[in-house]
Image (spheres, grey):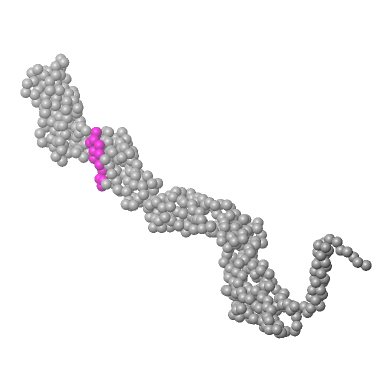
Amino acid sequence: MIIRLQNTTKYRKLTLAIISLMVLIGLWNIAAFAETAPALALHEESIVIAKGKSQRIAVDFSGPQTKLKWESDDPEIAVVNAGNVTGKKNGTTLIRCVAVLEDGKELSADCEVTVYTPVQNMKITQGITIDIGQEIPAPEIEFFPADASYQSVVWTSENEAIATADESGKIKGISAGTCRVIATSTESLSGNSNAKTAVCKVTVDTPVSSITIEGQEQSVVKGKSLRLTATVLPENATKKTLTWESSDPDIASVANGNVSAKAAGSVVIRCSASNHTGETVVAEYPLAVLSPVTQIKSEYRDRIVITEGDSISLSVTVLPEDASNKNVSWESNSPETASVDDSGKLTANQAGDCIITAQSMDGSSKSAKISVLVEPRVPLVGSEFKRSGPFGTVSQISVRVNNITKTKTITSYSLGVKYTFHRREKWFQNLDSGYYIIAPGRSDILHVRFANFFHMTFGSNYRVYLRSVQYSDGTREDFQGEEAFLCSE
């Protein structure tokens, strides 16, 4: 039978496809029966080990039995023996496994090895004390050994109602009390089982917000003492230790609120308390140290003699010299005789005796008394007026003059006589007594003769006035007109 193939091109393509398929099937059969190729692989691509510790690296090798070689890129960091790796010092290196095949070819696989120094111990040397609201940096941690690889930590507070710790270790006081803040080495977070911690005891105090100083007086006498008390707020402040100081210990010193006054002057007593933040709360108490008056001395050994109508300024000496208040008040026990104003100006008002008192104004009750005698302005008083003359005329008058002073001796004086008759006036001036001494309290009779007396009759009126007076101390007093009336008939 003869088969005729039509469409030759179509069948040619089919034939080529069949042939290609048969070739592929043959190749697959050859590979299936061929020997498997050798392969080398390590179980870990990288490991982390502690210095001085060892770890075995597992290996997978497929192929004919052969010898495996191990080597380290940096034996100072890590060494390897039969796959057992030992850390030597901190660092990273490659550990390599090499398989040498029968035909001399080599297969290799690498493992990255990191060596670290583990934390053996860590501690915070001392606890901290802070105030409510205060923030402080993380406390210092000491690591053992000093070259430990993982020296970073995670901070936590066991009681965040008392104190908190953020990720940087900054601690903040929240309320009064005590709690623990713990630092945990990050070595445990790196996959290592070594988890070391350090504990910091945190005490949170209530800080002092204000101080008030109280005392009974704003002044104290030199040589005396004064007790001051301080009130601290809030009442539940933890640290109430107070420091007392004086702005000038030479004037007044202070210890625990007890002030000792040493010298006259002004000081400021301060009381302070320091908070953990470094802030100092201060209260001040101004204080005057007084030097009291111990004596007031009169400048006048004897009594003061002053003439009626005159004024003088009085003065006293106040002791000691450093007396704080040297002011004095002035007072007269007889102002109608002599008055004195606040400045010590004495005015003689009328003849007589009085006592002027200078009184201390610092409360020491010291005083000085000054005796004052006010002499009359007109030292003479006339009496026993008599007139005489022939035939109803007046040719002579006589007057007894009395020295009414207590201290002044009169050596001479002159009078004036005013004669009045039927509204006609005539003066007889400067009728001199001559040098007749009149001691205090004594008297003299002055006789006045008139040369032209025929017109002077008993019906006339006579008034006698003092014109001048000379004293034994050399002073002289003159009077005008009717200023110094002595007597009349």
Q: Quadrant of the N terminus?
A: bottom right
Q: Residue 241: x and y, percent?
A: 53, 59
Quarter-of-image position of residue 177: bottom right
For the residue pair 35 and 38, the one nearer the viewer reads as 35
Q: Residue at x 15, y 38 (%)?
A: 475
Residue at the far top: name it: 422
Q: Which residues are magenta?
A: 300-312
For the residue pair 318 and 143, the one nearer the viewer reads as 143
Q: In the rendered view, would you say 388 is above or below 17? A: above
Q: Is residue 115 visible in this depiction of the protein?
A: no
Quarter-of-image position of residue 85: bottom right
Q: In the rendered view, would you say 71 is above or below 397? A: below
What is the count of numbered marks? 0
Left or right: residue 280 compared with residue 18: left
Q: Is residue 419 visible in this depiction of the protein?
A: yes
Left or right: residue 372 compared with residue 152: left
Magenta stretch containing residue 63, yes or no? no
Q: Residue 423: x and y, percent?
A: 16, 15
Magenta stretch containing residue 302, yes or no? yes
Q: Residue at x 80, y 67 (%)?
A: 16
Q: Residue 228: x and y, percent?
A: 49, 53
Q: Residue at x 25, y 42 (%)?
A: 304
Q: In the rendered view, would you say 217 is above or below 176? A: above
Q: Residue 158: x and y, percent?
A: 66, 62
Q: Quadrant of the C terminus?
A: top left
Q: Residue at x 63, y 63 (%)?
A: 155
